[in-house]
Image (cartoon, rainbow, N blue to C red):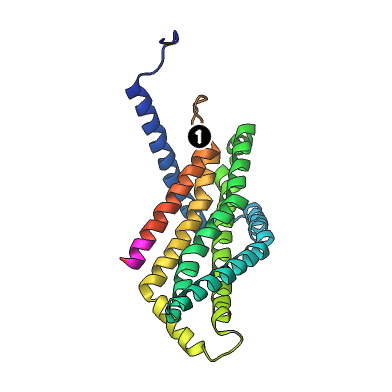
């Protein structure tokens, strides 16, 4: 039985979904461009912004640095042991270490660092930004002549990018050291072959893809939750919630990972 309340037709509902989807992605791209301009602008680093930036850099990186490094070390040890034992059983021991480096350092650690920073730092910061918007704090800043993006969003976004790159870089170094120790032990005899293998894996093209992927991961996890928290769709029936921002963030991370795999192996 048809409801007495008039509803939207199927084309109208489809158009509404497409419009909200396009608007959300446009806001992410626009916010990313604005943040890049503000980062490169010396006027963005006033006394208040510098203090907020230093605070968020510390809060988003220092408390999680040790824990994530230990987690990456445990994953490195377990994965190295599994791959080495499996490769030896199939007579492929000379490929074991290269496989560990490719899977762990090139693919797993950057993605894990991005997801860890998102869950621990940037998504909560995006929620805080949404609460500031709903309480009227951002509007009061705008009426007072201050830029809400420069004052509240920029320090959070820069701290998220810094935390993601720092965790990924430190964990990759730890993984490389533990992978060597897992295969050769505390001996320098395997260092020449290890350095040759390292140079073979980290060719210039692969290194470029790795660096670009890590930077894009950090930008995605830093900007997309902030965009979901900063903007209000104005539609009470279907608001742009944190869940929508989370889905878009995962979609971007998946797309970046797919492109990097294509660039490395095809």
* Place of residue 251 in the rendered image (x, y in percent of width and height, measured from the top left): 43, 47
Is 111 located above or below residue 98 in the figure? above
Residue drawn at 55 percent across, 60 percent down = 113
* Place of residue 262 in the rendered image (x, y in percent of width and height, measured from the top left): 34, 62
Is 251 located above or below residue 89 in the figure? above
Residue drawn at 52 percent across, 75 percent down = 85
Residue drawn at 40 percent across, 36 percent down = 21
- Is residue 123 a member of the stretch shown in magenta? no
93 vs 80, left or right, is left
Query: Start and end of the magenta stretch?
Result: 261-265
Residue drawn at 53 percent across, 70 percent down = 82
Is 103 located above or below residue 253 in the figure? below
Name the image quarter holding the C terminus. Answer: bottom left
* Place of residue 100 in the rendered image (x, y in percent of width and height, measured from the top left): 48, 72
* Place of residue 247 in the rendered image (x, y in percent of width and height, measured from the top left): 48, 43
Disc 1: CA contacts within 10 A as few (<14), some (14-19) or many (>=20): many
Name the image quarter holding the N terminus. Answer: top left
Residue 70 occupies which quadrant of the picture?
bottom right
Depth check: give the residue in front, 86 or 136: 86
Which residue is the site of mark 1? 240
- Is residue 262 a member of the stretch shown in magenta? yes
Depth check: give the residue in front, 174 or 2: 2
Residue 62 occupies which quadrant of the picture?
bottom right
């Amino acid at each position: 039985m048809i409801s007495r309340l008039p509803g939207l037709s199927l084309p109208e509902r489809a158009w509404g979904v497409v419009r909200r989807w396009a608007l959300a992605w446009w806001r992410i791209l626009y916010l990313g461009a604005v943040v890049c301009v503000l980062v490169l602008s010396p006027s963005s680093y006033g006394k208040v912004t510098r203090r907020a930036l230093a605070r968020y850099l510390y809060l988003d990186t220092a408390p999680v640095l040790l824990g994530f490094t230990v987690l990456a070390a445990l994953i490195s040890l377990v994965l190295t042991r599994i791959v080495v034992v499996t490769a030896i059983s199939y007579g492929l021991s000379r490929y074991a270490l290269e496989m560990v480096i490719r899977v762990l350092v090139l693919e797993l650690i950057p993605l894990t660092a991005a997801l860890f920073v998102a869950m621990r730092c940037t998504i909560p910061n995006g929620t805080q930004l949404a609460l500031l918007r709903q309480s009227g704090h951002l509007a009061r800043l705008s009426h007072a002549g201050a830029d809400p993006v420069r004052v509240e969003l920029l320090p959070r976004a820069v701290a998220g990018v810094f935390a993601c790159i720092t965790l990924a870089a430190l964990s990759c170094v730890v993984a490389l050291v533990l992978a060597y120790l897992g295969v050769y032990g505390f001996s320098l005899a395997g260092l020449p072959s290890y350095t040759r293998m390292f140079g073979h894996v980290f060719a210039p093209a692969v290194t470029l893809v790795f660096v670009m992927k890590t930077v894009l991961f950090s930008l995605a996890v830093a900007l997309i939750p902030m965009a979901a928290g900063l903007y209000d769709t104005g539609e009470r029936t279907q608001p742009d919630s944190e869940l929508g921002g989370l889905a878009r963030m995962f979609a971007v991370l998946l797309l970046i990972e797919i492109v990097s795999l294509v660039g490395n192996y095809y």
